[in-house]
Amino acid sequence: MADNVYEMFTEYDDVVSVDDVSKMLHLSKVTVYDLLKSGRIHTLKVGKRYIIPKKSIIDFLAA
């Protein structure tokens, strides 16, 4: 499954933004922030900015 999901997101960079995740998963930005804050999607937070590896989105979907 992870290979198929990875192929779906080829147009996105290896590091994505909250806006990108919102588009990728068809979720609101509020929901994406909730997923990031809860740790369900692994991320790094630098200041106020989230650094989200595309692999974290793929892992989230595969879980």
Image (cartoon, rainbow, N blue to C red):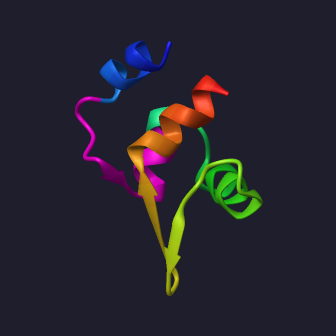
Q: Is residue 26 above or below residue 14?
A: above
In terms of image quadrants, where is residue 33? bottom right
Name the quadrant of the C terminus. top right
Image-based side of 61 in relation to 18, left or right: right
Q: Is residue 39 visible?
A: yes
Q: Is residue 4 above or below residue 46?
A: above
Q: Is residue 26 visible?
A: no
- Residue for point 52% across, 83% down: 48
Q: Is residue 61 above or below residue 31?
A: above
Q: Which residues are magenta?
A: 10-23
- Residue 12 pos. (x, y %): 27, 40
- Residue 21 pos. (x, y %): 48, 45
- Residue for point 51% across, 39% down: 57
**Magenta stretch contains residue 22:** yes
Instruction: In the displayed orientation, state which residue is furthest to the right.
Output: 38
Quick one: 18 or 15, which is closer to the camera?
A: 15
Image-based side of 2 in relation to 16, left or right: right
Quick one: 32 or 58, which is closer to the camera?
A: 58
- Residue for point 47% across, 20% down: 2
- Residue 56 pos. (x, y %): 51, 44
Quick one: 38 or 29, which is closer to the camera?
A: 38
In terms of image quadrants, where is residue 17? bottom left
Image-based side of 1 in relation to 34, left or right: left
- Residue 37 pos. (x, y %): 71, 64
In terms of image quadrants, where is residue 59? top right
